[in-house]
């Protein structure tokens, strides 16, 4: 028994050390991962949720105290068992000694007692007393056998109680481990609740981001409407500019016609000068006419110069409008390139995260392989100890066989007396008890090994589950944070783009107002001059309308592409929100499963407590039975003492009678 208890203590110590290592390693890993996550985000609020590394210290202290109390109870019960065994052995030895002494004394008295005819009546009375004494002895022997049987039953019940106590010890250890696991689960639930709070905050942020996106979309729609209005105004301005250009071209043609007419007049002047000799009378009239024509030419040249200046200004305005259009196209291309760059960066980040997770998985595999090797070494040591115990059991079996062979030899030789036969029976019973103890030890060893294996399997499974849960939660948090960062960046970009568009629209409005003012002034000045040339510009207007239609088609195509991109972004945001909701639902289902598991563990704890109470009741009942047996043994001892006193009195009387008979014969 002592060796078994030492062996179980060693196993308990080893299991405690292994559990502490696992708990410290898991906690260190969990804390390091959480610190890394918190450093990556830079949030001070989340760092306060990190758990201290000393949260398992009070659990270990309570567990050690509980083990010390149970060890003290074991020692106390062992002492009581040893005392009871010693008392029973002393009582059995004294009963056997008294029985043998009484038997020897009676046989000697019967042998030495002379039987005669005169002493018939005395012998008859002595025989009655002897019969009474023999009946009392038989009763005492029966009580002794009953006491021995009760002692055997009590010893069997005590063995069974020891088994129950050891099972209770193992169950208590399991309950302590389960309590530790419950506390870790509670801590994990607290962390999960904190993470749920964070997820709710992230949901709120997502909702705000959605609202911002909706506001931005509304602003974008307003801006598109404003841009459409501006484009319409620009088209009108372009049409006006084209009409102005047509008028300028008409004025150029007129100036060319005037120049040709001037040339004709010059030729006429030459002819007139040649004919001056002939037409001196008409000279004065022609000179006046030439002066008037020169004045008109000067006026036409001034008008031509002003028309050229106006045409140059209109060309500059058209070039500025084309530049703004090209800038808008370039900005759209830059936006598309930025979107592609963002997609590439997201893919790179995903690949980096996958590489980091693979490295972490490889490191954890190495650590767990080292731990598995340690456990295999400990199992090999346990197997060696089991082999040693099996060798001891085989030795005991061999000794038992040797004793049985000796008993058979003695039985065949026929040299066995009644006392020797009883001793042999006692030896046989002891052998049976030893066999039972051996079977009990083997069963205990098997149960202990099975429980150790179950504990190892359960601990490894729970550790793997916890690690998988932690990894999943960390991946979810990282993805949610990346999504939030991406949404915030998009929001900032949209705000910047909106501000730029607002600035551009304001600049365009200013330019448009200035252009309108200038155009109105020019139109008011040019309407009177170029009203005659409207019919010539209708063909040019039709050509410009065709070009304007083409430009409007291109602008509409650009607007359609922008709307498609906006719809794609909306669909991507919807998909992200749906994936986040699915992940949150999976986390809730896992939390419900863990709650059910904790409820099952609580029910098991209640059952174990009820078993402990029943075992205590059984121990009290067996203690009461042992006290009763002690009382009966004391009563049997008193009866045996009274019987021995009566026998001594009878022997004294017989001796006196024998001496009197001898004196009379002499």
Image: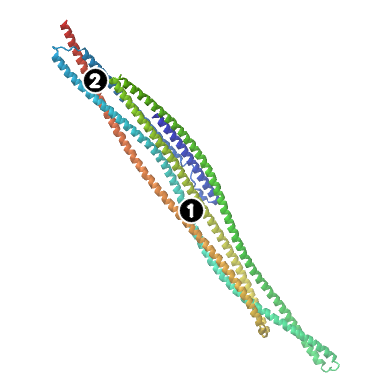
**In the image shown, does 284 or 642 lie closer to the viewer?**
642
Query: Which residue of the protein is positioned furthest toward the right in this rendering?
Result: 277
Q: Quick one: 531 or 575, which is closer to the camera?
A: 575
Which residue position holds label 2? Answer: 641
- Answer with left or right where residue 477 lies relative to residue 232: left
Q: Is residue 29 above or below residue 144?
A: below
Mark toward the viewer: 2 or 1: 2
Picture quadrant where residue 660 is located: top left
Secondary structure of the residue carrying numbered label 2: helix
In this figure, which residue is indicated by the disc labeled 1? 198
Q: Position of residue 41 (x, y in %)?
A: 54, 51
Q: Residue at x 81, y 92 (%)?
A: 284
Q: Position of residue 266 (x, y in %)?
A: 80, 87
Locate residue 275, reporting x and y percent: 84, 92
Position of the N terminus by quadrant: top left
Horizontally, residue 17 falls left or right of residue 108, namely right
Please tell me whether mark 1 sits on a helix, a strand or a loop. helix
Task: Please state which of residues 399 and 3 is positioned toward the viewer in this rendering.
Answer: 399
Disc 2: CA contacts within 10 A as few (<14), some (14-19) or many (>=20): few
Furthest residue in direction front, as rendered = 412
């Amino acid at each position: 028994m002592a060796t078994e208890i030492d062996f179980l203590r060693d196993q308990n110590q080893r299991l405690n050390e292994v559990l502490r290592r696992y708990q410290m390693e898991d906690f260190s890993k969990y804390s390091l991962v959480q610190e890394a996550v918190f450093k990556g985000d830079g949030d001070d609020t989340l760092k306060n949720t990190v758990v201290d590394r000393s949260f398992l210290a009070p659990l270990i202290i309570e567990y050690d105290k509980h083990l010390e109390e149970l060890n003290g109870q074991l020692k106390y019960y062992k002492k009581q068992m040893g005392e009871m065994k010693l008392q029973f052995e002393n009582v059995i030895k004294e009963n056997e000694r008294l029985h043998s002494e009484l038997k020897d004394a009676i046989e000697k008295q019967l042998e030495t007692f002379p039987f005669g005819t005169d002493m018939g009546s005395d012998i008859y009375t002595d025989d009655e007393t002897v019969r009474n004494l023999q009946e009392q002895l038989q009763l005492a022997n029966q009580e002794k056998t009953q006491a021995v049987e009760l002692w055997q039953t009590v010893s069997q019940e005590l063995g069974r109680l020891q088994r129950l106590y050891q099972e209770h010890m193992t169950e208590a250890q399991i309950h302590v481990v389960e309590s530790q696991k419950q506390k870790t689960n509670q801590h994990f639930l607290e962390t999960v609740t904190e993470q749920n709070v964070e997820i709710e905050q992230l949901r709120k942020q997502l909702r705000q981001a959605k609202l911002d996106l909706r506001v931005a979309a509304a602003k974008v729609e307003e801006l598109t409407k404003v841009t459409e209005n501006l484009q319409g105004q620009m088209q009108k301005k372009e049409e006006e500019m084209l009409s102005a250009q047509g008028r300028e071209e008409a004025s150029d043609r007129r100036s060319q016609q005037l120049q040709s007419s001037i040339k004709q007049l010059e030729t006429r002047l030459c002819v007139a000068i040649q004919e001056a000799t002939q037409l001196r009378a008409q000279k004065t009239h022609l000179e006046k006419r030439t002066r008037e024509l020169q004045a008109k030419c000067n006026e036409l040249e001034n008008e031509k110069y002003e028309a050229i200046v106006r045409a140059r200004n209109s060309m500059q305005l058209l070039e500025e409008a084309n530049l703004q259009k090209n800038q808008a196209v370039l900005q759209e291309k830059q936006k598309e390139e930025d979107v592609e760059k963002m997609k590439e960066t997201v893919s790179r980040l995903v690949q980096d995260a996958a590489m980091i997770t693979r490295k972490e998985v490889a490191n954890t595999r190495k650590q767990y392989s080292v731990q598995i090797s340690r456990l295999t070494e400990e199992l090999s040591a346990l197997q060696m100890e089991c082999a040693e115990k099996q060798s001891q059991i085989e030795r005991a079996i061999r000794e038992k066989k040797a004793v049985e062979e000796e008993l058979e030899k003695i039985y065949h030789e026929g040299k066995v007396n009644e006392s020797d036969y009883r001793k042999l029976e006692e030896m046989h019973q002891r052998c049976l008890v030893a066999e039972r103890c051996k079977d009990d030890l083997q069963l205990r060893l098997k149960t202990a090994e099975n429980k150790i294996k179950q504990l190892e399997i359960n601990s490894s499974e729970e550790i793997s589950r916890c690690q998988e849960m932690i990894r999943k939660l960390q991946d979810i948090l990282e993805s949610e944070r990346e999504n939030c960062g991406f949404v915030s960046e998009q929001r900032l970009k949209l705000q910047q783009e909106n501000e730029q568009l607002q600035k551009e629209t304001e600049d365009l409005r200013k330019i448009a107002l200035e252009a309108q003012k200038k155009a109105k002034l020019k139109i008011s000045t040019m309407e009177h001059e170029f009203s005659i040339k409207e019919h010539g510009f209708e063909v040019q207007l039709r050509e410009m309308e065709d070009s304007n239609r083409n430009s409007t088609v291109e602008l509409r195509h650009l607007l359609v592409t922008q709307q498609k991109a906006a719809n794609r972004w909306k669909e991507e945001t919807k998909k992200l929100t749906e994936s986040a909701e699915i992940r949150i639902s999976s986390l809730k289902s896992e939390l419900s499963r863990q709650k059910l598991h904790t409820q099952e563990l609580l029910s098991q704890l209640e059952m174990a407590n009820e078993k402990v109470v029943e075992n205590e009741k059984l121990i009290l009942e067996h203690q009461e039975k042992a006290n009763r047996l002690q009382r009966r043994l004391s009563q049997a001892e008193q009866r045996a003492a009274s019987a021995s006193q009566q026998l001594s009195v009878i022997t004294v009387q017989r001796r006196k009678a024998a001496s009197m008979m001898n004196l009379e014969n002499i």
